[in-house]
């Protein structure tokens, strides 16, 4: 059973469930981010989503269900978009840079939900916190695997792949967490390019740097595709 299926719905039409849940989750994300999870009520979510409280309970059992699917949606997007963006790329350095780009683009598209994940994951039931952590771990393994391919191919010097992976993940999340500090200084494209110079380029070997220099500058297209 998938995580979405574990959240029970009175309505059985999958398309309608997806549409309504998206509508309600969008409203909840805004309110949770602005005023906090605990102080936000189902009534406020209903008003923001322009639906009745009764309708919300047709698609969610309680507020924990809403928070869980809100956070799960972000993780699902990472798992879908990063592989899609690196599909067909064969060079390890290009795959790593593209993966970083895809991760940051998802964060940019879901800044409120990213911040919410940091603030409110602890508010979930224990079993659901485990599912959220597992989802993030799967995404991180994709980044770590890309780093490992670079070191194995001689494009990157030996490095603690696990720690570097988390530095990249934290960098991506920081675009949302510290957006107030970055938005007046950098576009997303500028932010990611600077990040690659800080987190990837210093570890590259000579042939790795040569490969990085040849990567097409198609970042704006990637942002549009991902968002």
Image (tube, rainbow, N blue to C red):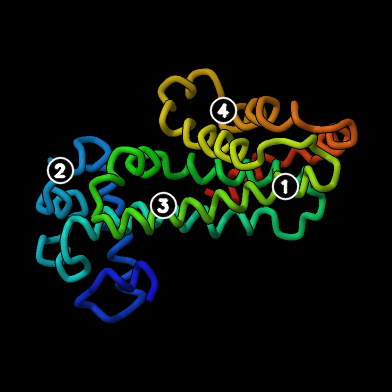
Label 4, residues with CA under 10 Å away: few <14, some 14-19, many ≥20:
few
Query: Residue at the location (49% across, 31% down)?
Result: 175
SS for tag 3?
Answer: helix
Q: Earlier in the sequence, mark 1 or mark 2?
A: 2
Q: Name the residue under label 2.
A: 38
| CA distance for labels 1 and 2 | 41 Å
62 sits to left or right of 121:
left
Label 1, residues with CA under 10 Å away: few <14, some 14-19, many ≥20:
many
| CA distance for labels 2 and 3 | 21 Å
Q: Which mark is residue 89?
A: none
Closest to the camera, between mark 4 and mark 1, is 1
| CA distance for labels 4 and 2 | 33 Å
Closest to the camera, between mark 1 and mark 2, is 1
| Badge count | 4
SS for tag 1?
Answer: helix
Q: Name the residue under label 4.
A: 187
SS for tag 2?
Answer: loop
10 sits to left or right of 217:
left
Query: Residue at the location (49% across, 22% down)?
Result: 182
Q: Mark 3 points at which residue?
A: 133
Q: Mark 1 points at which residue?
A: 148
| CA distance for labels 1 and 3 | 22 Å
């Amino acid at each position: 059973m998938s995580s979405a299926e574990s959240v029970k719905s009175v309505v059985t039409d999958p398309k309608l469930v997806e549409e309504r849940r998206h509508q309600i989750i969008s409203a909840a994300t805004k309110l949770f981010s602005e005023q906090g999870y605990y102080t936000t009520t189902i009534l406020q979510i209903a008003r923001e989503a322009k639906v009745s409280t009764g309708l919300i309970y047709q698609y969610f059992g309680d507020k924990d269900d809403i928070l869980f699917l809100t956070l799960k949606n972000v993780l699902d997007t990472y798992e879908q978009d990063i592989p899609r963006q690196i599909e067909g790329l064969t060079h390890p350095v290009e795959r790593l840079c593209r993966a970083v780009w895809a991760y940051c683009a998802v964060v940019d598209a879901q800044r409120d939900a990213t911040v919410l994940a940091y603030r409110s994951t602890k508010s979930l039931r224990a079993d659901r916190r485990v599912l959220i952590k597992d989802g993030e771990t799967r995404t991180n393994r994709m980044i770590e695997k890309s780093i490992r391919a670079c070191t194995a191919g001689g494009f990157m010097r030996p490095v603690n792949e696990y720690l570097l992976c988390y530095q990249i993940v934290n960098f991506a999340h920081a675009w949302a967490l510290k957006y107030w500090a970055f938005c007046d200084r950098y576009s997303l494209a500028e932010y990611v390019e600077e990040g690659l110079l800080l987190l990837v380029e210093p570890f590259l070997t000579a042939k790795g740097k040569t490969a990085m220099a040849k990567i097409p500058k198609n970042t704006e297209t990637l942002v549009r595709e991902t968002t």
